[in-house]
Image: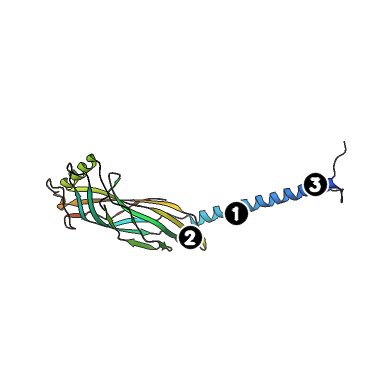
Amino acid sequence: MAMKDCGGHKGGGSGCECHKRKLYRKCCGFLLAVILLALFVILVVYLVLRPHKPQFYLQDLAVLCLNVTPPASAYLFTTMQATVAARNPNDRVGVYYDSADVYAQYKGVAITVPTRLPVAYQGHRDQSVWSPYLRSMDNVMLSPDLAVALAQDETAGYVLIDIRVDGWVRWKVGTWISGHYHLRANCPALIRVNEGKGSYGATTGGGTDYFRFQQAAACNVDV
């Protein structure tokens, strides 16, 4: 059987096929090298920059009203204002906050409707502070057990509320902007009721002197 010689034919069909195969292998090798180089560059950039997730702090929580009256009603009426600070700890990476909602939770159940924060960009080592109002808007109905638990905590003098931030962020390095990453922050807030004396069986109360935020604290952040 005769062997095909890819180098000895100048005009034959078999020589063209061999040349095409050589060219195809070279192109594939070149593309593979480019892909590996790009992955290597991305890895080096990530190791050098290594973006750190934003840091969130709950600076204040003013509870203006917190009213639930079980067993007559499990509807919750509340209005509060949370002061949340976010800091970008990166030296070379900016952060876009494209969308973020803030709401309050009690024992894992939302007790206010989400409030949308304004779109923001944080430069290197920059910080932003938001003070959104959080309201139940007559839309929050608790389960009977949860309504009783909240009323009991208020009567006892202390209520633990979680302020949650849920949104999407992007990283910016030079002119490059990443895709979206899901941001979640949880900020526990211990509220003292009537200077810790509680409501003495009453389940209504209000005013900044009646509900007092105990201490500013860092939030747990997940990106």
Residue 45 or residue 190, whichever sits in front? 190
Helix or strand or loop: what does disc 3 sit on?
helix
Disc 3 to disc 2, C-alpha distance: 48 Å
Q: Tell me the residue that label 3 is attached to.
A: 17
Instruction: Find residue 220 and name its label.
Output: none
Q: Is residue 77 left or right of residue 219?
A: left
Which residue is located at x 17 percent, y 43 percent?
72
- Quadrant in which residue 124 is drawn: bottom left
Residue 51 visible, this orientation: yes
What amino acid type should be assigned to the residue bearing mark 1?
A: Ala
Image quadrant holding the N terminus, namely top right
The disc placed on residue 172 is 2
- Badge 1 marks a residue whose secondary structure is helix
To which quarter of the image does residue 97 belong? bottom left
Q: Which label's residue is closer to the chain start, 1 or 2?
A: 1
Structural distance between the alpha carbons of marks 1 and 2: 18 Å
| Residue 60 locus on image (x, y percent) | 26, 58
Q: Nearer the viewer, mark 1 or mark 3?
A: 3
Of label 1 and label 3, which has the lower sequence position? 3
- Give x and y (percent) for residue 94: 45, 61
C-alpha separation, residue under disc 1 versus residue under disc 3? 31 Å
For marks 3 and 2, the one nearer the N-term is 3
Q: Nearer the viewer, residue 188 or 9?
A: 9
Amino acid carrying mark 2 in the image:
Lys
The image's mark for residue 38 is: 1
